[in-house]
């Protein structure tokens, strides 16, 4: 009798829960069924009598929210029988084999779905519920849950939580925030901006500090959320207990799922996802190094690359990466009417429009693959080259025009790579001085963008960039076409704030000294007229604090990332006033903590940190363990 009651209860749950409202079953879109899951087949094989014991399920990787709209937001979690990830839907008589690392063997577990309830409310006790629902997850989508919480109020803080159906097995409590209506008056919005988080190079302390300060409303991640490399090929994580799994270069769907899951074990990353809504976009390493439309630096559709990659083609590897990314990130299912569209925009009241580009995966012309640098240098100004493909490019220009037309105070453009010209011949020699994997390799595309801004009188433009593992602050100017004065900033059409990495190493060496980093920035700032400040030494992040009158960028450096801590240094602050289209002079107030100002001085502070076990002395020349 007891068994019959349990079966009946499972049947009731199955009837009342919803499959399709877990967005990951049709990830990444309705128009890519080969990437999604046939819900019909999943339901057909389901056996209600094999329903999960709620006590055997775990919320393995916290909660997250993202892509906020005025009336809705995406909520995410993962709840499964194992912290290990699904083996790409390889089934055995209705069961999926999971690898048990403790016993070094495969075990089979039921493929019955997990029923998950969720609710979102305006109070932490979750009494004033604004929206709720009940959905399934299963091994087919790596036990992830992604739902859209609707019927919310604009620019409002909410709290949310998941639980296994009919049980007290609950997830951590998450916090999120909707955006204002496009025509709402908003006084000030804070955003933390990140890029390039590399697990074996250090702890993701940068993610946690805005949580501890509660200093922003939203988080933007400009890409390289994960890296695809094998431990030892790029970073030695075993020295600090951070070996990325699986411990090999990743290719399969399981590989990408496991790598994302490993990164999500970092406590500061978990805290950021739990407390702030994210607006992420990918760069190249979410798939592989230096990706473009037809391949990547080591994926060129050749027999050699096919064999090296274990028989996984360029397209299949990209599809595996894309599917895992959409499963694990709190991101909306952007309508993919063609190719891999992730580019999208957000209107934050009358204050600003955020335009998130994809300058890597979508439709980018061939890039610098290391062996073809001379060739890409030769064609870098070819009019037929595009960072984003004609469709995205036209959409981008329309977004800029529509934003100006509707009267948004600012246009914030999220670009994976640095937009401004950067002569880096101090590092690369005089033959190929520019970074041809960035906008410098697509000069006609950049010129078309600048032409659209200048010709249409579109002002108050702020480009935000990642990828370079260094900090750069520039006036945005059309060099060699429009008159520009580096001393005053006159002639510029906007500014660019490019940020350092969360943990990825300095481009001039992981163990560069402060003195050598400062020497390099002195050369770089002198060699680039629009570049007003650069710092190469510190890993970190920056915050944008945006009002109708001005945008302020606050740069923070992380002095120690080889263990988890909350230390940070205020490196520099920059302001751009509405209508000025240039950095306010004196740039950075004339004084910065690190790096080089074009006009101003660097005043560096010594700091001693006693952790109880070790004392760290941080000087303006080096970091040493005493």
Image (spheres, grey):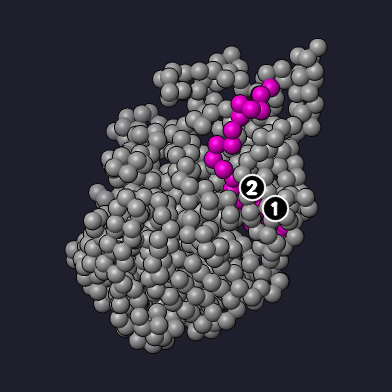
Residue stretch in magenta = 51-75
Cα separation, mark 1 vs mark 2, equals: 8 Å
Residue 308 image position (x, y, % from top left):
31, 32
Answer whether residue 581 is visible to the viewer in this image: yes
Residue 46 image position (x, y, % from top left):
68, 21
- At x 66%, y 28%, the residue is 54
Mark 2 falls on what kind of element? loop
Looking at the image, do the residues carrying marks 1 and 2 touch, with CB atoms under 8 Å apart?
yes
Mark number displayed over residue 173: 2
Q: Is residue 205 above or below residue 495?
A: above
**What is the quadrant of the N terminus in the image?**
top right
**Residue 314 part of the magenta-drawn span:** no
- At x 59%, y 63%, the residue is 217
Q: Which residue is mark 1?
A: 124
Is residue 256 shown left or right of residue 276? Answer: left
Q: Could you classify mark 2 by the number of other residues whose Cα lies within 10 Å: few (under 14), some (14-19), or many (20 or more)?
A: some
Residue 83 image position (x, y, % from top left):
51, 32
Pick the residue in front: 36 or 481.
36
Q: Residue furthest top?
A: 1
Picture quarter containing residue 8? top right
Mark 1 falls on what kind of element? loop
**What is the quadrant of the C terminus in the image?**
bottom left
**Residue 67 part of the magenta-drawn span:** yes
Q: Is residue 201 above or below residue 490?
A: above
Is residue 49 shown left or right of residue 236? Answer: right
- At x 80%, y 26%, the residue is 12
Picture quarter containing residue 410? bottom right
Residue 40 image position (x, y, % from top left):
69, 27
Pick the residue in front: 356 or 368.
356
The first of marks 1 and 2 along the sequence is: 1
- At x 64%, y 47%, the residue is 173
| Total numbered circles | 2
């Amino acid at each position: 009798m007891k068994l019959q009651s349990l079966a009946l209860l499972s049947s009731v749950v199955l009837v009342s829960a919803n499959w399709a409202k877990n967005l990951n079953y049709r990830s990444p879109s309705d128009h890519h069924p080969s990437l999604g899951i046939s819900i019909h087949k999943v339901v057909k094989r389901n056996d209600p009598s094999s329903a999960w014991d709620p006590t055997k399920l775990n919320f393995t990787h916290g909660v997250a929210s993202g892509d906020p709209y005025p009336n809705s937001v995406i909520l995410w979690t993962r709840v499964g029988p194992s912290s290990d990830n699904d083996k790409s839907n390889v089934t055995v008589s209705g069961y999926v084999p999971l690898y048990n690392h403790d016993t070094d063997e495969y075990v089979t577990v039921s493929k019955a779905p997990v029923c998950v309830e969720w609710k979102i409310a305006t109070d932490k006790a979750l009494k004033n519920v604004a929206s709720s629902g009940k959905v399934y997850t299963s091994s087919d989508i790596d036990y992830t849950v992604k739902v859209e919480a609707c019927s919310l109020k604009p620019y409002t803080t909410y709290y949310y939580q998941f639980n296994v159906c009919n049980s007290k097995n609950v997830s951590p409590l998450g916090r999120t925030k909707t955006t204002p209506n496009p025509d709402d008056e908003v006084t000030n919005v804070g955003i933390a901006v990140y890029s390039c988080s590399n697990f074996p190079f250090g702890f993701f302390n940068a993610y946690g500090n805005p949580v501890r300060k509660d200093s922003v409303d939203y988080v933007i991640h400009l890409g390289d959320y994960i890296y695809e490399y094998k431990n030892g090929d790029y970073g030695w994580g075993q020295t600090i207990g951070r070996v990325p799994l699986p411990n090999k270069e990743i290719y399969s769907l399981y590989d990408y799922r496991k790598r994302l899951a490993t990164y999500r074990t970092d406590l500061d990353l978990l805290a950021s996802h739990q407390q702030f809504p994210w607006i992420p976009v990918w760069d190249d390493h979410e798939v592989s190094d230096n990706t473009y439309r037809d391949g990547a630096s080591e994926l060129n559709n050749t027999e050699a690359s096919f064999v090296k990659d274990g028989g996984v083609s360029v397209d299949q590897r990209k599809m595996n990466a894309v599917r895992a990314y959409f499963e694990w990130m709190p991101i909306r299912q952007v309508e993919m009417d063609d190719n891999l569209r992730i580019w999208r925009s957000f209107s934050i009241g009358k204050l600003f429009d955020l335009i998130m580009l994809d300058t890597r995966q979508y439709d980018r012309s061939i890039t610098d693959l290391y062996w073809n640098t001379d060739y890409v240098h030769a064609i870098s100004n070819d009019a037929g080259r595009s960072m984003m493909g004609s469709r995205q490019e036209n959409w981008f220009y329309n977004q800029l025009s529509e934003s100006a037309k509707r009267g948004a105070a600012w246009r914030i453009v999220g670009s994976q790579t640095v937009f401004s010209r950067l002569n880096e011949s101090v590092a690369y020699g005089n033959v190929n001085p520019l970074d041809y994997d960035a906008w410098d390799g697509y000069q006609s595309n950049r010129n078309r963008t600048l032409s659209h801004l200048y010709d249409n009188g579109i002002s108050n433009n702020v480009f935000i960039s990642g990828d370079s593992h260094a900090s750069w602050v520039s006036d945005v100017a059309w060099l060699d076409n429009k008159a520009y004065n580096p001393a005053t900033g006159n002639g510029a059409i906007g500014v660019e704030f490019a940020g350092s990495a969360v943990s990825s190493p300095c481009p001039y060496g992981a163990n560069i000294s402060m003195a050598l980093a400062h020497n390099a920035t002195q050369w770089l700032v002198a060699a680039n007229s629009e570049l007003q400040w650069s710092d190469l030494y510190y890993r970190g992040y920056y915050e944008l604090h945006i009002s109708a009158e001005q945008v302020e960028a606050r740069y923070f450096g992380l002095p120690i990332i080889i263990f988890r801590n909350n230390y940070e240094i205020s490196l520099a602050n920059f302001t751009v006033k509405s209508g000025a289209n240039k950095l306010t002079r004196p740039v950075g107030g004339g004084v910065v903590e690190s790096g080089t100002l074009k006009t101003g001085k660097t005043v560096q502070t010594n700091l001693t940190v006693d952790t109880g076990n070790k004392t760290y002395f941080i000087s303006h020349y080096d970091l040493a363990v005493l």
